[in-house]
Amino acid sequence: MKPEERHLFIEACFRRPVERTPVWMMRQAGRYLPEYRAIREKYDFITMYKTPELVAEVTLQPVHRLQVDAAILFSDILVIPEAMGMALEFRERQGPVLLEPIRQVGQIPSLKPVEPETDLNFVLEGIRLVRRELEGRVPLIGFSGAPWTLATYMIEGGASRNFGHIKRWRFGQPDALHQLLERISDAVVAYCRAQIAAGAQAIQLFDSWAGILDAAGFEAFALRYVRKIIQEIRTPGVPIIYFARGVGAWLPRLATCGADVVGLDWQVDLRTARQILGPRMALQGNLDPTALYAPPPVIRQLVREMLKRYGAGSGHVANLGHGILPDVPVEHARAFIEAVKTESPVFHNTSETERLP
Ligand code: 1CP
């Protein structure tokens, strides 16, 4: 069989049998890698994600160095607000900032519909380059921000402490918020479809700020749009992952999102999550990213515990519960990846797993 015909990562996403648990790390293409920092010394972050050759190079760095089971495109969720016409600036030590956040309903009509082939061609070209260079070794994950999280950045302007602006919309003018979320959803659908057409083999929707909502708000302002997007971008053979942070209290609701895989943060217990979500979807996660500060033998033990919490059989993609932190030693990241690869086969071998508690 040619390598591209069967990828562990894709098989596990669809809960088909695998000989071991596949593993990758959110934010694996980033600052903890010295080779990333070396490029970053020469270019600012925005130039990097707008240059397809650099996108390809950085995307492949963790594949070469750590032999992860999937590549994730080096880019950012804020390319969508930027393509909709919002000015974006990257500030060192602060991160990305949208210079004129949306604070009035009247600003919504000025947002442009997104045409990925023209507005975001640097992403699509990056995908094509990565696919060519990967030669089918591991699959490439494309991604987008989910509408709620993108709306949070568009209204707050950047990272926020209390999310006072968007919360004011959520409770005070929900219709205006829905109007904005509709527009963002249209852009996300077009963007994800274009990524798949260019060669993305899986799509992850990042809802990093879902956890600031209340239960009813999570359903009305986050899930409802995610469900619709997933229906519209569904493509045979291309798994869709929904990563929502801070939503452990709403697992039964999460089960209705329609994704093939749900990404979980480290506060969720994998066994409980599998009981609730397992019959319908695969699970991805969820080691605490700060666990990678521990020495490698401890990391190995923590990985063993994570695998055991999930239990026997397929349907688990090992990952961190959020992005890898910039000051984690590369050798600790390697210990995480290797521990999953060497410890997990026992959980896929029925004669062995029958003996597990
Ligand atoms: O070199 C630098 O200083 C830039 C650091 C950096 C990197 C490497 C940023 C700025 N973004 C990225 C890459 C990135 N961002 C990827 C690449 C693929 C990967 O390796 O996983 C992805 C998937 C993202 C997604 C992203 N960007 C999210 C969702 C995931 C998450 O971590 O919650 C969010 C919220 C962003 C916004 C963003 N971009 C960058 C920063 C520092 C932030 C966070 C700002 C904040 O809210 O505090």
Image (tube, grey):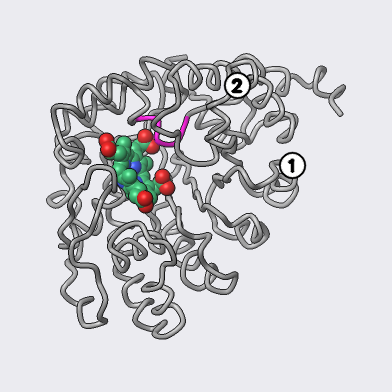
On the image, numbered disc 1 is attached to which residue? 271
Q: Is residue 144 visible?
A: no
User: Which residues lie in the magenta part?
Assistant: 25-29
Residue 266, relative to residue 149: is it above or below?
above
Q: Secondary structure at mark 1?
A: helix
Based on the displayed image, in which of its 4 quarters is residue 32 positioned?
Answer: top left
Q: Identify which residue is drawn at 65% across, 21% down.
A: 298
Going by the image, does 356 lie left or right of 111? right
Q: Identify which residue is drawn at 64% across, 25% down.
A: 303
Residue 96, relative to residue 217: is it above or below?
above
In reply to whether residue 28 is colored magenta, the answer given is yes
Q: Identify which residue is drawn at 26% across, 20% down.
A: 133
* Location of residue 96 in the rendering, given as x and y in whole percent from the top left corner: 26, 50
Going by the image, does 298 lie left or right of 351? left
* Location of residue 218 in the rendering, given as x and y in whole percent from the top left corner: 53, 67
Q: Main SS of the magenta segment?
A: loop
Q: Identify which residue is drawn at 26% across, 82% down.
A: 105
* Location of residue 100 in the rendering, given as x and y in whole percent from the top left corner: 18, 67
Based on the displayed image, in which of its 4 quarters is residue 317 positioned?
Answer: top right
On the image, numbered disc 2 is attached to which residue? 340
Q: Secondary structure at mark 2?
A: helix
Amino acid, disc 2: Val
Of 219 and 286, the residue lying toward us? 286
Earlier-in-chain disc, 1 versus 2: 1
Whether the residues at callouts 1 and 2 have beta carbons within 8 Å, the answer is no
Give the quadrant of the C terminus: top right
Amino acid, disc 1: Arg
Q: Residues within 10 Å of mark 1 (few under 14, many from 20)?
A: some
Of 47 and 342, the residue lying toward us? 47
